[in-house]
Amino acid sequence: MKSIKIVIALMVFATALSAKAAPLLNGLALEQQFNKDRYIAAVYSETLANSSSVLLDNGTPRRLEVRIVANSLSARRFRNQWMEGIAINNPGDTLSNQAENMVTFANLFQGRLRRGDRLSIDYAADSGTTSVALNGLALGEIADRDFFNTLLRAWVGPVPPSTDFRDGLLAAGQVSSGLLGSYELLEPSSERVAELAVRLEEAEEEAAAEEVVAAAPVAAKPSPAKPKLAADIPPPTLAAIDSKPEVPTGKSEPSKPQPTKVAATKPAASAQELEEEEEIEEDEAPLTADLILARQIYHSMLLRHTFKYIRYPKRAQERGQEGSVRLNVTIDAKGKVQDVQTLQESRYATLNREAREAVDRAGPFPAAPPQLARDNYQFSVPITFRLPD
């Protein structure tokens, strides 16, 4: 009996030690599009912090977690949105060095994410390895000490999805009880976990078969050169205060704000409409390091171009109005604006209107590079209106 008690005590002690060593919840953030909840993002760290520089410490074990709120979410669109954030929050040399890792990471996302799915990305400080899992099932890992921070900067860097999103993650453990309750209730069903397990097993079998074919003797081919960027891509600046927006060549600056020429904001789609829209996705070319770099460079170019035409409305400055607006812009191959939709609004109509008018002033945008040429190109524009302290 005594020995049993000792074993139980040791088990309790070991459990307490592991619990103590586990990363702590630093913050939570809700991602919305078209006024619909998409997912809740979380950052865990051994060191609680309200500073991004502290959370970007490579010597600290950390974890990113995403729990899906929407009934259905395109894994590819989720991935592409994250990669847009990576492009505008990381320097050019980082994008170049991480291009191959981004291909590996992007190819982990297949099919659709469902309500309750839990995507976890863990960083082991001792080995520098980033491990990715979905609902507890391992998807893959990337052995590069700098890769985890490349992902994290998209959330807590200078141009996050929104200031509220970044502030929620930089809460130093002071999270909203309501959001935490919703977050903790999200979990996959046993049927969903079993479905994923079968899919991963089939994918492994296919990969093994491809390796056998690849092992057959073939003529040696030179290894492709690692893509590089000629220069760093600076992140876009915030909305300028007390400055006039630039006017595209061939346009005259209006003496007073003019109505935007882009299509009016579309009404928020219903959840069912969004799911049906996401079910219909165009075929995508196989991802390569060159293609990913081309996307990231072009996206940064489009944002830098847009940000030259943003001004901080005088009325909003006088009233102390601040906020974030995120737009989804569709342009044709020559850069002409075809459509603008508001993914996320601020609380103030003045700021929302200025964001859309800035896109109108910015058109036409730079044409897409040849490797990205298609009938149209979509990109998101996060705009932050924040007054100096």
Image (cartoon, rainbow, N blue to C red):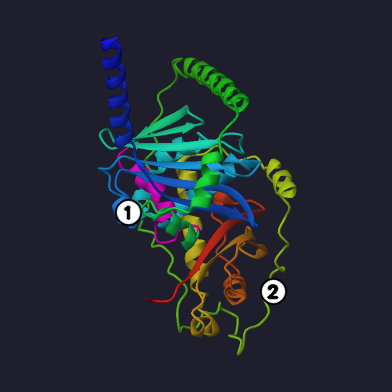
Circle 1 crowding by C-alpha within 10 Å: few under 14, some 14–19, many from 20:
some
Q: Position of residue 4 (x, y in %)?
A: 30, 12
Please provide the residue range marked out in magenta: 144-161
Q: Is residue 298 left or right of residue 25?
A: right
Residue 153 lies in the magenta stretch: yes
**Which-is-in-front pick, marks 1 and 2?**
1
CA gap, disc 1 to disc 2? 44 Å
Q: 371 and 184: which one is in front?
A: 184
Q: Is residue 171 above or below residue 349?
A: above
Q: Is residue 128 above or below residue 219?
A: below
Helix, strand or loop at label 1? It is loop
Q: Position of residue 241 (x, y in %)?
A: 45, 80
Q: What's the mark number on residue 74?
A: none
Q: 32 and 106: which one is in front?
A: 32
Circle 2 crowding by C-alpha within 10 Å: few under 14, some 14–19, many from 20:
few
Q: Locate the N terminus by quadrant.
A: top left
Circle 1: residue type: Ala
Looking at this view, name the residue that lies furthest to the bottom.
255
Residue at the (56%, 46%) spot, across then down: 39
Q: Is residue 94 left or right of residue 163?
A: left
Residue at the (35%, 38%) spot, across then down: 123
**Residue at numbered disc 1:** 49
Label 1 vs 2, first from the N-terminus: 1
Q: 187 and 74: which one is in front?
A: 187
**Residue at numbered disc 2:** 261
Q: Position of residue 264 (x, y in %)?
A: 72, 69
Circle 2: residue type: Lys
Residue at the (60%, 90%) spot, across then down: 255
